[in-house]
Image: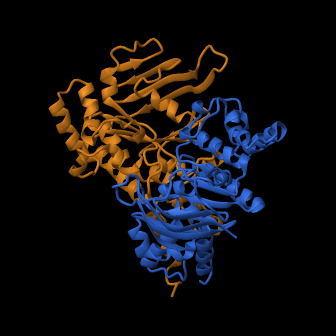
Chain colours: A blue, B orange
Amino acid sequence: MNSIEVKDLNYRYTKDGEDVLQNINFTVAAGEWIAIVGHNGSGKSTLTRNLNGLLAPTKGEVIIDGQLLSEATVWDIRRKIGIVFQNPDNQFVGATVEDDVAFGLENRQIPFETMHERVAAALAAVNMTNYAQKEPARLSGGQKQRVALAGVIAINPEIIILDEATSMLDPQGRQDIIHIVQDLQKQTKNTVLSITHDLEEAALADRILVMEGGHLIASGTPREIFSQHELLQEAGLTLPFAMDLAVKLNQAGIKLPGTFLSSKELIQQLWTLRSKM
Amino acid sequence: MDITFKNVSYIYDMNTPIANLGLKNINLTIQSGSYTAIIGHTGSGKSTLLQHLNALLKPSEGTVVIGDRTITNQTNNKNLKPLRKQVGIVFQFAEHQLFEETVGKDIAFGPMNFGVSESESLEIAREMLQTVGLEDKYFDVSPFDLSGGQMRRVAIAGVLALKPSVLVLDEPTAGLDPKSRREMMTLFAQLQKEQQLTIILVTHQMDDVANYADHVIVLEKGQVIQDTTPKALFNQPEFVLAHGIGLPKATEFAVALKAQGFEMSELPMTTAALIEGLTPQLENKGK
C-alpha cells in the first residue's frame, strides 16, 4: 500500500506567479524513510505543505493512504500526518510544555488517562520530562525542537514529516532525535519524510528525493544519489563526510574501491588496507 | 574592544517562584579582534550569555566590561545606545526580524535609527548588500520575496550597517543548505580579517569551531567548563564526549581510527590534516 502518491503536482503562490513546484511525481510506500534534500528555495517545504493541505495544489493530485486530498478529506488526512516544523515557535499553543504536547491528543479526543500516559512517554522519549511544567517560550531553541517532536510522537501519526526538525540541536541531540524516530518507526511502521540539510542523516534514509528549482530532479537510494557527483553539484549539495574523505584519499593516491556511506564502512576498508602490509 | 565577564551570574525571574538560574559565576575575557566560539548543550546558557554582550540582559551579580563600558545590575537603560551600535547581534532565525517594504529600507533601518540621514543610510545599505554577497537587483525587492538563505543575509546586512566592532552570531547557519552555510561562514571570516571585527559565534557545528575560531568557551548548566583553543579542546576527546559536545568530523574519524590501531600523535581537526596523517600509514599498500 502506498502511503503517499503525488501525481503531476504543480504549485504557485499567486495566480500570476511562477510555478514554484513543477510537475512533481513520486510515491512513498508505507513504512519508508525518505529524505528530501535540495538547497534553500528549491521547493522542499512547499512540497510538504501540499501533502497535508496547508497549501492546495494548483494542478495535480495528492493521495494519502489511498485517499485523494480535497476539501472533503483534508481533516481526515491531517489526522494521519504529524509535522515538526523548523522553527518550533510557529507551532506552540500550550501554556506549559505538557499542555502543548497534549494538544494534538485533545484534538483527537483521546481519553484523559491515556493522554497523560502518552504525554509523559513522549516527553521521556525526547528527554524533556523535567521541563513538563515549564513555559515553552522559555526554552532554548533546541529544547523547543524536542518538545515539538514530542507533540508528534504522542500522536504517533501514520506519516511523520520532519521539516529541518533537528537544525538547532547539538550533534548528540540530533542523533538522539533520529534514533527516537527510528525506534518509533520500527515499532509502528510510520512513514517518515525528513527534509534535511544534514547529509549524514540523509545517508540513513531508504531513499533520497532531490529537489532543485521546483523540480524533483532525482530519486534513489543514498548510494545511488551520492555517487552522482554532477547531480550533487547541481543541487548545491556536498558529500557525507566518509564519502568526501574517500574521494580525497583517492586523489592523494590511496585507492579505495566502492562508495562509503558511513565512517564505519570506510574505517573497515582502511583497516583492511593497512593490514595488507 | 575587549569584553570581560567578572563573577557574572544571571537569574531569570529573580524573586519569583519561577526563578531559574541562567548563568553562574562566569569569568572570561574575549579579546578584541578574536574569533571566539561559544558551545554547549541546548539550554547550557549560550543565548543568555550572548544577551549580556550588549546589555539586553544585565547581570544579576558581577560585572560585564565591554570596551570602556561597565555593566552591572545597577546600570541604567539610558545611554546604552552607543554600546548597542558597537555590538551587533544576529539572532537565531534573524530573517524573522525583517519587516520593511524593500530590502534596501530594511537594511537602512538601523543606521537611520542611530541618526544617520536617509540618503546616507540607503547608501550604506547598498554597500552592505554587496558585502553579504547579494546582487544589487535585490535592493528594491520586498525581503519577503527572497529565499530563506537570502533573507538571512539581508538581516545580517542590517546588523553590519551599524558598523559594529563586535559581531555576535547566534547559530547563524541553522537551517541553511551546505553551500549557503559555507558561503556565510566564509563571509564572517572575511569580515574578521578585513575589518578587524571581533566575532563571537554560538554554534553546534564543531567543524565550524575547528575551521574558524581561535578561542572556544564551553558552557554547561550556566557555567564555563572550558576556556581554551579549539585544538586543545578537541585533543581531549574523552572530555568532549563525556560532556556531550561532539567532535569535528575529521577528529571523530581519527579517534575511531586510533581505536583500530592507527597512529595519531595529534588528533586532526580538518579533513586535510587527517589525510596528511593517514597517507604515510597507507602508502604503497593500495596498489
Residue farthest along the bottom direction in this orientation:
B287
Q: Estimate the x, y position of residue B158 in percent, counting from the top left.
A: 30, 37
In the depicted view, which residue is nearer to us: A147 or A113?
A: A113
The residue positioned 70% from the left and 53% from the top of the image is: A157
Task: Determine if residue B278 is in view.
Answer: no
Q: Residue at x 61, y 25 (%)?
A: B21
Quarter of the image with the N terminus of chain B is top left
Left or right relative to A77: residue B183: left
Q: Is residue B264 left or right of residue B148?
A: right
**Where is residue B23 shown, x and y percent of the image?**
56, 27
Q: Residue furthest left?
A: B119
Res A73 visible: yes
Instruction: Classify A81 as above or below A220.
Output: above
Specify the quadrant of the image occupied by residue B201: top left
Exactly how many numbered labels are in the figure?
0
Quadrant position of residue B40: top right
Position of B227 relative to A16 (above/below): above
Estimate the x, y position of residue B32 in percent, counting from the top left.
Answer: 34, 35
Furthest residue to the right? A113
The residue depicted at 61 percent of the width and 84 percent of the height is A276
Q: Who is closer to the viewer here, A2 or B194? A: A2
Rendering coords of residue A39 (x, y %): 43, 60
Along the viewing direction, whichever of A218 and A175 lies nearer the viewer: A218
